Amino acid sequence: MSLKAPTIGIVSLGCPKALVDSERIITRLRSEGYQLSGSYEGADLVVVNTCGFLDSAKAESLDAIGEAIAENGKVIVTGCLGKEESLIRDTHSKVLEVTGPHQYEAVVSAVHTHLPQLHDPKLDLVPESGLRLTPRHYAYLKISEGCNNRCSFCIIPSIRGDLVSRPANAVLKEAESLVKAGVKEIMVISQDTSAYGVDVKYAESKWKDRMVRAKFYDLCKELGELGAWVRLHYVYPYPHVDDVIGLMAEGKILPYLDIPFQHASPRLLKAMKRPANQDKMLERIASWRKICPDLTIRSSFIVGFPGESEDDFETLLDFIEEAGIDRAGCFKYENVEGAPSRDLADHVDQDDIDERYDRFMEVQTELAHARGQSMVGREIDVICDGWDDDAEAYACRSKADAPEIDGVVFVESEREIAEGEIFSVRVEAAEGHELRASR
Ligand code: SF4
């Protein structure tokens, strides 16, 4: 059976920057198997990349959209005039979708929605779920690039730029393809996961028979319907994070939050320019645990940030104990080139940094030990990562363990266990972050 590849036409208006954008769009679509057509009749859909610099350019863009609708009928508008969506829609109500300048992924995603690509497993070099470096049963799902925050110790925004969120339907499509390809656990990542969609004003996009907002809660809810474990990383404690705890309690997404608190002293958090108000954090964590008692909180902290006093450091130690941070990672402050914190006063001596690190790790180890002991005798679900020769057992992880960074549950079993299999075990012993269990 031969299937005709979907064919795109593109009308590119405006300056050389817009031309480069058009080239990127067609390069991406071509790599996905779309054909290109130089005529309206030969295309199944037309993308009009507009210019909105001057009134005359706007008029030219609106004319071009009108021509494409008259000649072809299926039109997606992108580019600078895309900022004036209501002008476009008032003039041409038949336009299928409007995206703004430099929104390659939103354009490509709109094309996927209105003219789905063909996936032919016999011909395509790349599987529908993409090429991955992780084992077959888990995958990372990036929902945005860049970051709008300016934490004083961090140079990521200067390297990667401001937040650019992917359209919700593009994220969900990728997640669904991963699950179809055998992925059992999805790790949602970004620089600031809970800020998802702020840059695009939580724009809606069509997913299946419904519209889904590019919003943290909405995305988590949809991901929770895919039948895989969904784990959230790099979540800042903005107020709307409270909403996803209910999804965790319902079992839709894993009861796991990776929140990089970095510190607990209000004075230092201010100097770090950390996002989100961490006031009353202990009360909030307690209220989360009331709704979802199995919640695991992973966090990372920096010791020895400029200006950190012994009091600040003790505030931090008290916090990890009182909040019951289940997985606490610790970094020694580093004077990263280009980071604004280099210019702060009162840098801490390296000996003090090393000493605080050791004290942090002691507290962390005690917490891990107590947590491990509290698990003994419990029945928990685990996912298998494969056989471990040294431990002579299957290396598995509970819902509280992200791959690579958290603990391991070693499971002895008479029956062979496949990678990615999820099953129940009874915990028999614990040491630090390692548990021993049998099925
Ligand atoms: S540390 Fe701060 S600035 Fe850096 S990526 Fe994270 S939230 Fe953004």
Image: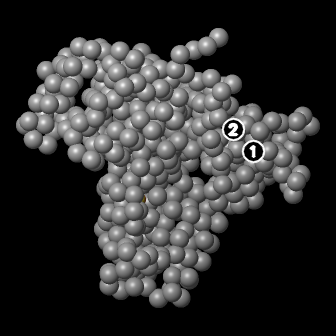
Instruction: From the viewer's perspective, tell me whether residue 292 is left or right of residue 269.
Output: right
Amino acid type of the residue that numbered disc 1 sits on in the rendered structure: Asp
> What is the crowding at mark 1: few (fewer than 14 residues within 10 Å), some, or many (at least 20)?
many
Q: Considering only order in the chain, which callout, 1 or 2, is on the residue closer to the N terminus? A: 2
211 or 295: which is nearer to us? 211
Mark 2: which secondary structure?
loop
* Residue drawn at (66%, 54%) of the image: 404
382 or 324: which is nearer to us? 382
Mark 1: which secondary structure?
strand
For label 1, the residue is 385
**Occupied quadrant, residue 367:** bottom right
Instruction: From the viewer's perspective, tell me whether residue 73 is left or right of residue 227.
Output: left
* Residue drawn at (51%, 39%) of the image: 292
For label 2, the residue is 137
Position above or below: 267 against 99: below
Q: Are marks 2 and 1 in contact (CB under 8 Å)?
A: yes
Position above or below: 294 against 431: above
Amino acid type of the residue that numbered disc 2 sits on in the rendered structure: His
Residue at mark 2: C-beta within 8 A of ligand 1: no
x then y, percent, for residue 12:
28, 35
Where ligand 1 lies, by quadrant?
bottom left
Q: Residue furthest left?
A: 55
- Mark whose residue sits in front, 2 or 1: 2
Instruction: From the viewer's perspective, tell me whether residue 345 is left or right of residue 316.
Output: left
x then y, percent, for residue 266:
33, 67
* Residue drawn at (52%, 75%) of the image: 332
x then y, percent, for residue 191:
43, 53
